[in-house]
Amino acid sequence: MVIVTIRAGFRVVIPKAIRTRLALRVGQRLLAVQHGDRIELVPMRPARQLRGFLRGIDTAVPRERD
């Protein structure tokens, strides 16, 4: 866990280890989501970059009839 500080203009620096792990870039957009008393920053990814991320998922689940 890393602690960050809110600076002037409500700016927060994302630590380098996290930026590297998530492959964040300068100018990339983040979605800010509030969950109760916490904030989650979710990287916005182009749809093209998401292609194939569900490869290998088990689709054999019981389904309701139409």
Image (cartoon, rainbow, N blue to C red):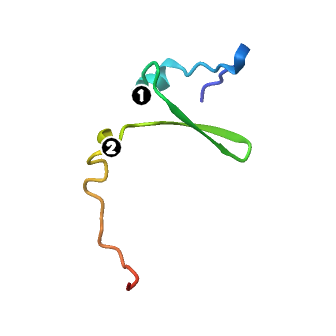
Q: Which amino acid does label 2 sit on?
A: Leu
**Closer to us: mark 2 or mark 1?**
2
Of label 2 and label 1, which has the lower sequence position? Answer: 1
Tell me if mark 2 has few (under 14), some (14-19) or many (20+) residues whose alpha carbon lies within 10 angstroms of its own: few
Give the SS element for disc 1. helix
Q: In which quarter of the image is residue 60?
A: bottom left
- Tag 1 residue: 21
Height in image: 14 above or below 60?
above
Report the side of 46 relative to 44 (left or right). left
Q: Which amino acid does label 1 sit on?
A: Arg
Picture residue at 38% right of the left edge, 79% below the top? 63
The percent coordinates of residue 23 (x first, y second) are 39, 26
Q: Separation of disc 2 and disc 1 at Cα?
A: 17 Å
Q: Can residue 7 be seen in this view?
A: no
The percent coordinates of residue 52 (x first, y second) are 26, 48
The percent coordinates of residue 51 (x first, y second) are 28, 46
Report the side of 60 relative to 9 (left or right). left
Picture residue at 36% right of the left edge, 38% below the top? 46
The percent coordinates of residue 1 (x first, y second) are 59, 30
Q: Is residue 18 visible?
A: yes
Picture residue at 30% right of the left edge, 59% below the top? 57
Q: Determine the residue located farthest toward the top in the rendered image.
A: 8
- Work out which quarter of the rendered image holds the C terminus and state it: bottom left
Picture residue at 35% right of the left edge, 74% below the top? 61
Q: In which quarter of the image is residue 7?
A: top right
Give the SS element for disc 2. helix
Q: Tell me whether circle 2 and circle 1 mark residues in contact (CB < 8 Å).
A: no
- Tag 2 residue: 50
Height in image: 11 above or below 63?
above
Height in image: 65 above or below 14?
below
